Image (cartoon, rainbow, N blue to C red):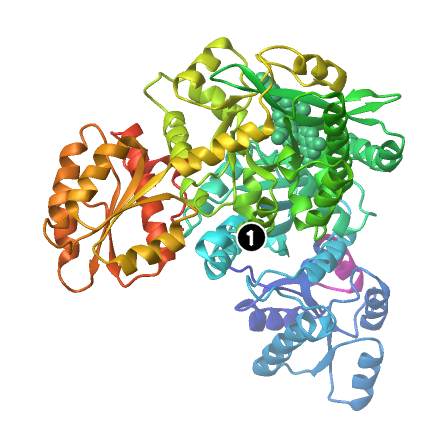
């Protein structure tokens, strides 16, 4: 319920006062004062909650004009509109009242309609026209706009010096994702739902606004200690909104101690507090306190030092070895930056990388790391060591850098290296946040010959379906994922599935954070390609790494590794069974670089090919209108074969011949009606491969129920 607006009636005559109260009581909350002095005392308590003052002029103790002058001179009350009441309809009185700052004027005897009308219109005027320069409401949510909120908070803090207040700001962690998946209108509806919740819960004791896109701010009287339960409850209500099931909201609280800092800064502090718990599950709010203040001061110091540190070469790269699991050969290294500060000592990247990602310095630092890594590679080449590859980290900010491609190419040219010597590790979350841009930028880098590794795969919002479209060569499984998956019994979990899917898609897999012999054995057993982790080798200075390079067995040459991968890709066969040579030609042209295509014009040849190529066949495209032996018979034969070799099959045929239903009945996994686009055929092929890899590894689970990996079907 909306609280009634409050009106202060200042009138010495009891009868008149009662009359006024009676007129107003239905629509307003009325407070009464007998004279100016009493009215000032009330104002001090009620402050800006008074929407309007009805003021008699002739009164004992302090008359109306004196009171009016004081009110209009006070910064806290001057905005409260005053309507003066006088005995007569005299023009002189009116002029006097208005010249003292009254907003309007009513004559006695009181006529209820006129009083109510004037009061309503003056309050309305003050709330809208008086704020002519401020756009008061946020057009989407109907909450206050940021500018108006600042104004209101400033006034309130001034007017109520004895009341304690908190600024509470909320931030939706993954709002962009929600917009991407469900669309902007759905995102907008969620924001409106949240705004409604703010209004219903905070009531009249709070001032709320939409602070930024998905951030809300609220000034609240301090009444209690905040608990996680309170915010958890709010989160539950937000989750109940349509499409909001996965909304993650974090709150930050700034207890207003210093009223002299700008309101904007108070909100910033609350938001900063909220950010500190961004990735922490089960943590709903954080307060801005001394710890956080010290952290921010520390960050400021780091920010002041970083440029000089780069110039003075305080940053160094450490290399962590990567091994090929099947033969224990050294297969590469990841370059990880370290900061050796002359006073603070060795700083680990976890301490400064997140800050550099926020303040933008990461792009400079990354370029330095890439340069150093290439310099090291060239040095090794000159020393005659086997040409292994080094992986470097590429931040999200680097992807937005329009010069990225130039910079990388210049760097490898400077050190006379082929691009495949440099692997670029791009974190999985970057792929989910800016899919289009990433696909373009990374796709191009890949065309130039750089090897792309998707870093931290499995840590966040992985969608395996999405992998189809992503330019990637290597999946780098996140450390936490490896550790939790290898802790499960061998026949459970999705690790096997991911590895077999990677196999289907000709991606290599690196397991990160391997810490024990058992983990390594487990990875070996399920066919994971590479491993990196403390069990095998910690990040080490370049000099120490060189010792590894000279040990036996000899390191895996980067060219050898690429060749192996290319062979694997070549090894994947698409069996194309179709009576129409023209059609086969079209498909070969479109998909020939993805698969080795084995063609058959009739069922018998097709079955013979299956016998020859056996498990190397990744999928089959099978016409339902084959001449002699029909496609259905081939399908049936495939079904029988499935006991030992299940070939995912896309059936094809002209639309409208009821072939589709028959094909499914005979065991096809999908049907492509002719004529079709080659891209749509490719999508169907990838989809059946995906589904069958899943079934093979997880016979008990349905593909769309796979939690972590159950991303949106693109
Ligand atoms: P990351 O790219 O996922 O790197 C792997 C991190 O895991 C490294 O931490 C590595 O030392 C650590 N690690 C490796 N094996 C194990 C293990 O078996 N157990 C455990 N507990 N940890 C292991 P580090 O060097 O502290 O780097 C942390 C993160 O900082 C990196 O995570 C990466 O995101 C970032 N980073 C490091 N260097 C750079 C850089 O030059 N540029 C950018 N943009 N980010 C970097
Ligand atoms: Ca990495
Ligand atoms: Ca990683």
Q: Is residue 362 visible?
A: no
Assign ligand 2 to one image quadrant: top right
x, y percent for residue 126: 69, 72
Q: Is residue 371 above or below residue 119?
A: above
Residue placed under numbered mark 1 in the picture: 203
x, y (%) of residue 572?
37, 37
Q: Is residue 227 left or right of residue 312?
A: left
- Of residues 610 and 650, the one nearer the viewer is 610
The segment highlighted magenta reads: 33-45
Q: How dense is the environment of label 1, judged by Cα within 10 Å: few (below 14), some, or many (20 and up)?
A: some
Q: Nearer the viewer, residue 108 or 592?
A: 592
Write down the quadrant of residue 226 in the picture: top right
Quick one: 246 or 327, which is closer to the camera? Answer: 327
How far across and down, in percent of the image, does residue 34 sit? 73, 64
Does 127 lie within the magenta span?
A: no
Q: Is residue 110 left or right of residue 662?
A: right
The residue at 44%/55% (across/down) is: 182
Q: Is residue 412 above or below residue 101?
A: above
Q: In the shown orientation, is residue 667 left or right of residue 650?
A: left
Tell me if residue 655 comes above or below residue 632 in the rendering: below
Q: Residue at x 74, y 73 (%)?
A: 56
Q: Decide which of 637, 296 is in the foreground and name it.
A: 637
């Amino acid at each position: 319920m909306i609280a009634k607006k409050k009106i202060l009636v200042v009138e010495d005559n009891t009868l008149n006062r009662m009359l006024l109260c009676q007129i107003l009581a239905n629509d307003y909350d009325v407070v009464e004062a007998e004279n100016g002095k009493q009215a000032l005392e009330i104002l001090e308590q009620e402050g800006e909650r008074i929407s309007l003052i009805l003021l008699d002029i002739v009164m004992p103790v302090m008359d109306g004009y004196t009171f009016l002058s004081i009110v209009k001179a006070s910064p806290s009350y001057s905005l409260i509109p005053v309507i003066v009441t006088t005995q007569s309809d005299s023009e002189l009185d009116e002029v006097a009242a208005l010249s003292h700052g009254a907003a309007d004027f009513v004559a006695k005897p009181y006529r209820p309609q006129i009083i109510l009308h004037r009061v309503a219109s003056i309050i309305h005027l003050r709330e809208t026209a008086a704020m002519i320069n401020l756009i008061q409401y946020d057009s989407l949510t109907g909450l206050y706009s940021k500018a108006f909120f600042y104004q209101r908070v400033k006034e309130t803090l001034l007017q109520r010096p004895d009341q304690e207040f908190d600024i509470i700001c909320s931030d939706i962690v993954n709002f962009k994702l929600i917009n991407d998946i469900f669309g902007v209108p759905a995102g907008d509806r969620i924001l409106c739902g949240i705004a409604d919740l703010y209004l219903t819960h905070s009531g009249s004791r709070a001032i709320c606004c939409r602070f930024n896109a998905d951030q809300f701010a609220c000034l609240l009287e301090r009444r209690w200690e905040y608990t996680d339960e309170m915010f958890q409850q709010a989160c539950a209500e937000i989750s109940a909104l349509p499409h909001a099931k996965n909304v993650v909201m974090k709150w930050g609280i700034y207890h207003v101690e210093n009223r002299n800092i700008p309101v904007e800064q108070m909100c910033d502090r609350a938001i900063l507090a909220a950010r500190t718990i961004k990735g922490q599950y089960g943590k709903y709010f954080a307060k801005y306190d001394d710890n956080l203040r010290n952290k921010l001061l520390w960050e400021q110091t780091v920010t002041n030092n970083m440029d000089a540190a780069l110039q003075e070469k305080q940053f160094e790269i450490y290399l962590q070895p990567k091994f090929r699991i099947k033969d224990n050969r050294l297969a590469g290294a990841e370059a990880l930056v370290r900061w050796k500060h002359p006073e603070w000592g060795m700083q680990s990247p976890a301490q400064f990388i997140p800050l550099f990602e926020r303040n933008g310095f990461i792009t400079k630092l990354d370029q330095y790391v890439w340069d150093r890594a290439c310099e090291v590679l060239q040095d090794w080449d000159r020393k005659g060591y086997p040409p292994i590859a080094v992986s470097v980290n590429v931040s999200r900010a680097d992807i937005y850098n329009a010069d990225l491609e130039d910079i990388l190419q210049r760097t490898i040219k400077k050190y006379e290296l082929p691009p495949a010597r440099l692997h670029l590790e791009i974190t999985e979350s970057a792929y989910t946040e800016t899919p289009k841009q990433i696909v373009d930028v990374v796709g191009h880098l890949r065309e130039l010959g750089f090897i792309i590794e998707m870093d931290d795969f499995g840590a966040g919002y992985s969608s395996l379906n999405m992998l189809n479209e992503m330019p990637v060569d290597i999946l780098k499984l996140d450390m936490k994922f490896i550790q939790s998956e290898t802790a499960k019994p061998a026949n459970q979990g999705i690790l096997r599935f991911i590895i077999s899917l990677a196999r289907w898609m000709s991606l290599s897999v690196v397991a990160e954070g391997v810490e024990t012999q058992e983990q390594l054995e487990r990875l070996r057993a399920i066919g994971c390609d590479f491993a990196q982790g403390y069990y095998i080798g910690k990040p080490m200075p370049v000099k120490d790494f060189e010792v590894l390079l000279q040990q036996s067995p000899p390191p895996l040459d980067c060219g050898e590794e690429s060749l192996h991968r290319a062979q694997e890709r070549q090894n994947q066969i698409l069996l194309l069974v179709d009576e129409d040579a023209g059609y086969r030609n079209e498909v070969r042209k479109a998909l020939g670089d993805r698969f080795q295509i084995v063609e058959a014009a009739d069922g018998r040849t097709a079955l013979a090919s299956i016998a020859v190529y056996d498990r190397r066949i990744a999928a089959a495209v099978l016409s339902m209108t084959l001449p002699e032996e029909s496609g259905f018979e081939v399908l049936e034969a495939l079904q029988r074969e499935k006991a030992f070799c299940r070939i995912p099959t896309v059936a094809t045929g002209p639309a409208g011949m009821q072939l589709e239903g028959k094909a499914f009945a005979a065991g096809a996994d999908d049907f492509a009606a002719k004529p079709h686009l080659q891209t749509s055929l490719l999508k169907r092929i990838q989809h059946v491969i995906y589904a069958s890899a899943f079934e093979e590894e997880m016979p008990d689970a349905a593909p769309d129920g796979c939690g972590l990996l159950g991303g949106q079907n693109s």
